[in-house]
Amino acid sequence: MDLTVYHNPRCRKSREALQIITDKGIEPKIVEYLKNTPTVVELRSVIDKLGVKPESLVRKGEQVYKEKFKGKELNDHEWIKVLVKFPVLIERPIVIKGNKAVIGRPPENVNAFL
């Protein structure tokens, strides 16, 4: 099975989702998006696979969101540029299989993909 996981190893939920995947004997491609930030084109592709609006991927509890973006009205392209510039704001983990993706929050969400 060809899976890609946008992963933050410091995040407990991301680690739990990855564990669910590996416990099933699947070795996904892991993208540590804080080290290897997706481009605007790559992130747009992920968002399209998720079938969500870019703003719904924003982690609104993060300090950078509260300081710079809280209460601001941005369009989809602007949110994507924000997420590329500040990848800590990207909700995690994101699991991709083919042309579909799911956010692993709660981690059990990945079970539907496996």
Image (tube, rainbow, N blue to C red):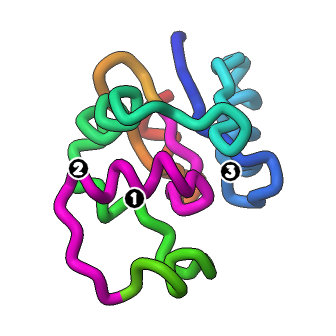
Considering only order in the chain, which callout, 2 or 3, is on the residue closer to the N terminus?
Answer: 3
- Looking at the picture, which amino acid does disc 3 mark? Ser
Query: Is residue 66 or residue 30 the one in the foreground?
Result: 66
Magenta segment, which residues?
A: 71-95
Give the x, y percent position of residue 103.
Answer: 45, 49
Instruction: Specify whether 52 is left or right of 86.
Output: left
Query: Is residue 33 or residue 14 the one in the foreground?
Result: 33
The relative height of residue 95 versus residue 9 in the rendered view (above or below) is above
Q: Which residue is mark 1?
A: 57
Residue, x 72% and y 47% (percent of image)?
Answer: 8
Instruction: Specify whether 10 is left or right of 40.
Output: right
- Looking at the picture, which amino acid does disc 1 mark? Leu
Q: Which mark is residue 77?
A: 2
Q: Which mark is residue 14?
A: 3
Residue, x 51% and y 55% (percent of image)?
Answer: 90
Residue, x 71% and y 17% (percent of image)?
Answer: 27
Q: Are marks 3 and 2 in contact (CB under 8 Å)?
A: no
> Which one is closest to the eye, mark 3 or mark 2?
2
| Residue 20 visible in rendering | no
Q: Are marks 2 and 1 in contact (CB under 8 Å)?
A: no
Considering only order in the chain, which callout, 3 or 1, is on the residue closer to the N terminus?
Answer: 3
- Determine the CA span between mark 3 and mark 2: 26 Å
Give the x, y percent position of residue 4.
Answer: 55, 24
The relative height of residue 39 versus residue 99 in the rendered view (above or below) is below
> Which one is closest to the eye, mark 2 or mark 1?
2
Residue, x 31% and y 41% (percent of image)?
Answer: 47
Helix, strand or loop status at disc 2: helix
